[in-house]
Amino acid sequence: MTKNEYLKQIDNVIENGKYKDNWQSLSHHKTPGWYYRDKFGIFIHWGIYSVPAFGNEWYARTMYDKNHREFEHHIKTYGTQDKFGYKDFIPMFKAEKFSAEDWVSLFRKAGAKYVMPVCEHHDGFAMYDTEFNRWNAKAMGPCRDVAGEIKAACEKEGLTFCASTHRAEHYFFMNMGRTIDSDVNDETYRDFYGPAYYCPELDSGTLHITTADTYSIGADKEWLEDWLVRTCELVDRYQPSILYFDWWIHNHSFKPYLKKLCAYYYNRADEWGKEVTINYKHEAFPPTVATFDVERGALTDISPVPWQTDTAIGKHSWGYRADNEYKSGRQIICDLIDIVSKNGMLLLNIGPKSDGTITVEETAVLLDIGAWFEKNGEGIYGTTFWKQFGEGEVNNEDGFFKDNDEKAFTGKDFRFTYKDGFVYAFQMRPDGNDVKIKAMKKHIPHDFLVNSVTLLETGEELAFERNENEMIIHTNGCMSDKPLCFKIEVD
């Protein structure tokens, strides 16, 4: 199918479907029940950038930028950018040890319920089989349909397959190659490097996500239509249950195309009988159209609508980096509980090596989380928020890129979830003492009843007492280096 034929198909699906390409129609879309129930998913950043394994997954950009250490590293390691460009890493990306079955089995052991590979990052290399991009993993590099294999493994293991595409940013992403003698300027490779839009009047030499140019430069019509067709093809071929976009779709030039994409995707899902949603950042979508996502951060209170945090086990890169540092399982579990208590979900990223293996560090963290889920998952899966998200002095800082440091929780910090007549109270940093929860104190004369308290870690029913100041749970000295969950039956 040609691009023009696909554009006509998109219009036909919207014309004949219940969702139209306007916010009034799209605002009636609901958060998927499976998504709200499952709470925890795995994000995968894997691509060509895992070959240099230096800096981060933006290597495709920074290797051409004199202001970044990747520039000199590239010359010293591989040669000058006109002789060895980003494209030349593709034959080195062999994925010889990649097993989608092994990956998804590990994710299931970690307690994850949905899986989201990055099907195309900003670098423009598709990790899936596509008619509209010859630079793809099925045709070169691994010579495998990576997304298709992960989808098949998810279906076998009973996990939900989702997909991420960061194609939008590719419009400008390689533009620092325009400022030096590099292969980005070779028109032979324009279909890989993209327009590499560069505007000297706006760009002072670097392009960061907070600078004015990313907000003011609008992609042209040809690019936007191409983006729409490629994204709709991804939807049709892989039928993901979530479609995730990175930040640049907030650019106003995308708005008409976002509405078309959203209407097409939701109408297609109707045809398939699937519940789906879109993850977005900033102000790209209204809050009742899609699911808001906070990158490497969280909210400070309960959200009236479901939302998501995406973050990584690795502290300094989403993709594999040889010298990365990693968060502990305890830190991620604490973040997960905090997010769920505020009506959110967690999408946790790993960055496999170029050969397709998952690092020892990330594997250990995933298994650590899974072991905790085996005993405490009841307080996470299928829950909703309680009347308050928690108590104690420790909370996260609002905003993006705020979660690298572990929060200094104490035995007085709690987070709450609720399900089927039970409040689940998580003590975020157990200290071995009896637990005291102010939120569960007696409310005279209008009070709820507490029938029982069970420690999920052991299944033991615990003695408790309540007064007008607090509820005291006698823990019998139970200790853990991770949060403990008290299942409180209320009546």
Image (spheres, helix red, strand yellow):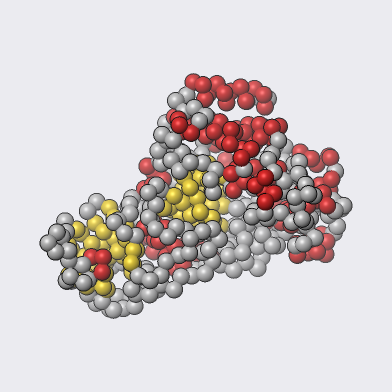
Identified at 78% across, 49% down, the residue is: 201
Residue 57 lies in what quarter of the image? bottom right
Quarter the C terminus occupies: bottom left
Rendering quarter of residue 474: bottom left
Residue 194 visible in the shown view: yes
Residue at 51 percent across and 45 percent down: it is 279
Residue 192 in view here: no
Task: Give residue 219's position: percent from left, percent from top.
Answer: 69, 39
Expressed as whole percent of the image width and height from the top left, the position of residue 168 reads 64, 42
Q: Is residue 444 above or below residue 243?
A: below
Q: Quadrant of the N terminus?
A: top right
Vertical relation: 22 (above or below) 136: above
Q: Position of residue 23 (x, y in %)?
A: 48, 33
Is 235 situated above or below 6? below
For the point 17% across and 66% down, which residue is it? Answer: 442
Left or right of residue 434: residue 38 = right
